[in-house]
Image: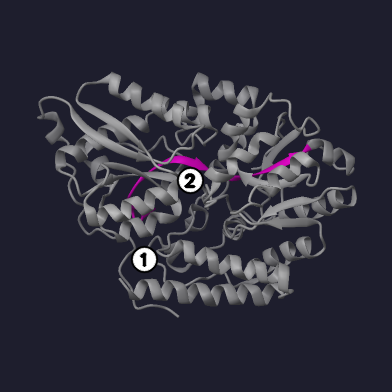
Amino acid sequence: MRTDRPLHLLRFRLVAAALFVTSGVAATTVATAAVSEPAGAATKLPGCNLSALAKHQGTENITFWESASSANLPVLQGIASAFNSSQSKVHVTLVTQNGYDDTWTKYTAGLSNGQLPDVVQLQDDRTQEAIDTGSFLPVQSCMNAAKYSTDDFLARPLAYWKVNGVQWAMPFSVSAPIVFYNQNSFTKAGLNPNNPPLTLPQMVSDAKALKASGSGMGLVLDPWHLETWLASANQLFVNNQNGRSTRATKAVFNNKTADSIFSQLRQMVRSGDATTNPSTGPDAYDNLFGMGSGKYGMTIETSAALGQITQLLGQGKYSSVKLGIGPFPVYSASVKGGIEPGGGGVYISNKVPALEQAASWTFVSYLMNTQSVATWAAGTGYIPVRKSSTQTAAVQHVWATDPGYKVAYNEVNNGVNSPATSGSVIGPYADVRTDVLNAEISMYTQGVPATKAVNSAQSNVDQTIAEWNSRL
């Protein structure tokens, strides 16, 4: 869902964006463990003593462990510098980590050695795992203390980090999957270069046409895609409202919708109309580099790549590519769901004194104000999570000059807002996705039927979740 997917790995894949040198945009559409406690339950939220900072004399120093890519880091540094200059009560120091996985590894080590940040940026699929550490102060506590309104926020990104009615983190680096395609390849295949596929069946059909004309589709092996297609059909991935009302205890995707998704993907790959590549290792960039070489005419990637793509425009490489951008192809135009958000949320530690928590909230609220969100979105390609930010000159200029930046925003702002479209909250998320990925690969490489692959994925996911919950 991420989003930024691990692809979750996006950070390491974005360098491949160098292949794009011209930009266009198309029209947009929009076994169960005995664990019953709510996933993020809090009968009474812990306090956030904002008066501790108000009474403090001098400047309070805090640290923010962030996971920005090298291309996006200057934007974040600019926001932090502006915050430090705007007042004298709090000074934030950014501590750069080598990606989301590295941040999490260091954070979990800090639970033992005491070396922890005041504020940390974590990937979306770590949400339940983060809650289970018991080491975070829900931002809801500070929101309540500050009488902070979230009416201006997009509902779905905000909902992702809300579990059992508690806002655990603020949505920050939010993205969504989109279609990148070569308009020249579409023209050669007899397809309208201004009309990318808007549904999964259309994507399968376009991949076939592209292959017949000498290209095809590059398809990254990413289990996140199944979750996204399910969400577009308003279908849950795990039980208990996708783990949002009570801790998830089993998968619920073994149904006709998932069978159809897997069947269509299987058909596309087995026929040769789409070629897969892993999301890690030496072939991780093949779907993107394949666009530049003419091997592929279309692929699915994250909107988080847009910032780096923009920075790399004009280098003069791969001049045969005229980039088009379209929305993620939904499961069906007749089924009303939505595209789930992905990316990173910002958390506040409960392992630091009340003064540092209050200082952290001061920074987080600044990070999430209208202008900061606009600056971050315009400078990186991430989705502006506040509606007021879309009306700023910075965002309006980017959307006018490069409309592709607006595609992901439209995706997460349109459609149904529900537990299905908010994304899942699962403790062993990485292992769950491995279970789904293994089932997907079995279809492509071993000829396993789609229905059997879905059944196998659900069975393994159930076991993975049960084992996790049994250890709590």
Q: Secondary structure at mark 1?
A: loop
- In the rendered structure, find residue 164 and report the number of the disc placed on it: none
Which residue is tagged 2? 343
Disc 2 or disc 1, which is closer to the eye? 2
Q: Secondary structure at mark 2?
A: strand
For the stretch drawn in magenta, the main secondary structure is strand
- 158 displayed left or right of 412: left
Q: Inspect the image, locate mark 1, and give the three-letter code of the amino acid beneath it.
A: Thr
Which circle marks residue 246 in the picture? 1
Does the stretch in magenta take in 434?
A: no
Using the image, determine if residue 106 lies above or below residue 271. above
Query: Residue 155: x, y in percent?
Result: 45, 44
Q: Is residue 176 magenta?
A: yes
Amino acid on which the number 2 mark rests in the picture: Gly
Asked whether the viewer can see residue 192, the reply is no
Q: Is residue 180 above or below residue 40?
A: above
Determine if residue 244 is in view.
yes
Q: Badge 1: how crowded within 10 Å, few (<14), some, or many (20+)?
A: many
Q: Determine whether, in the image, residue 272 is placed left or right of residue 436.
A: right
Residue 195, percent from left and from top: 78, 40
